Image (cartoon, helix red, strand yellow):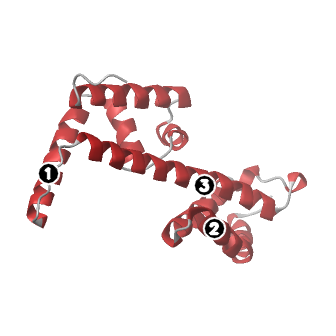
């Protein structure tokens, strides 16, 4: 059995040897330096947390880390897609008002936040918490399930039902 100090030293060596490869793979897949840095950090955090699950007989450390990297890249791309869809939906549903001053834009954003917060407050506490983790903390449903201790299916149901309630309350008359 290894001690925490031994694990830390081994992990530092793992990081020193493979961080540049993980970062390169993330940068190539994402096309963005900052997202690649975030993914690199997420990969090594996940590796540290899941270190007890590493089995050398199933593959080497490089393959293990690249497997984690693929999952984190997929998570980052999914988050990017969610953000783009939200921006696109907001652009198409919001009235096209062009405000020449930054103060006017800030005022509109403040109004939007107030409206969203009031609609979130109408949801059940669990739905509200799950949606906040999904959109404000940008967590995947799997990450939300891990953080809250809720089953994954329950998290998915809360997200779906909560979004339907928000949609119905914010845009009455729109049917999907």
Residue 30 sits in quarter: bottom right
Between 93 and 60, the one lying in front of the other is 93
Q: Is residue 113 above or below residue 36?
A: above
**CA gap, disc 2 and disc 1:** 38 Å
**CA gap, disc 1 and disc 3:** 38 Å
Rendered image: mark on residue 97:
1
Label 2 neighbour load within 10 Å: few <14, some 14-19, many 20+:
few
Badge 1 element: loop
Label 1 neighbour load within 10 Å: few <14, some 14-19, many 20+:
few
Q: Is residue 12 above or below residue 164?
A: below
Q: What residue do we see at 41% from left, 50% from top? A: 84
Q: Is residue 127 above or below residue 133?
A: above
Count of numbered marks: 3
| Closer to viewer: mark 1 or mark 3 | 1
In this picture, residue 119 sits left or right of residue 59: left
Q: Does residue 165 appear in the picture of this structure?
A: yes
Q: Quadrant of the C terminus?
A: top left
**Residue underneath mark 3:** 72
Q: What residue do we see at 35% from left, 31% from top? A: 163
Whole-percent x and y of residue 35?
51, 65
């Amino acid at each position: 059995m290894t001690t925490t100090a031994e694990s830390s030293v081994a992990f530092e060596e793992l990081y020193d040897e493979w961080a540049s490869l993980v970062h390169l793979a993330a940068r190539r897949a994402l096309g963005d330096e900052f997202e690649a840095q975030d993914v690199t950090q997420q990969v090594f955090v996940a590796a540290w947390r899941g270190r007890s699950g590493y089995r050398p007989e199933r593959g080497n450390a490089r393959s293990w880390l690249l497997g984690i990297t693929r999952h984190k890249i997929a998570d980052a791309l999914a988050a990017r897609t969610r953000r783009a869809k939200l921006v696109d939906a907001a652009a198409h549903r919001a009235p096209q008002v062009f405000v020449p001053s930054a103060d006017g834009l800030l005022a509109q954003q403040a109004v939007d936040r107030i409206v969203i917060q009031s609609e979130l407050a109408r949801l059940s506490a669990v739905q509200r918490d799950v949606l906040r983790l999904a959109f404000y903390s940008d967590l995947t449903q799997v990450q939300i399930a891990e953080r809250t201790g809720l089953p994954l299916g329950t998290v998915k149901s809360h997200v779906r039902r909560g979004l339907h309630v928000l949609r119905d309350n914010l845009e009455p008359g729109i049917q999907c």
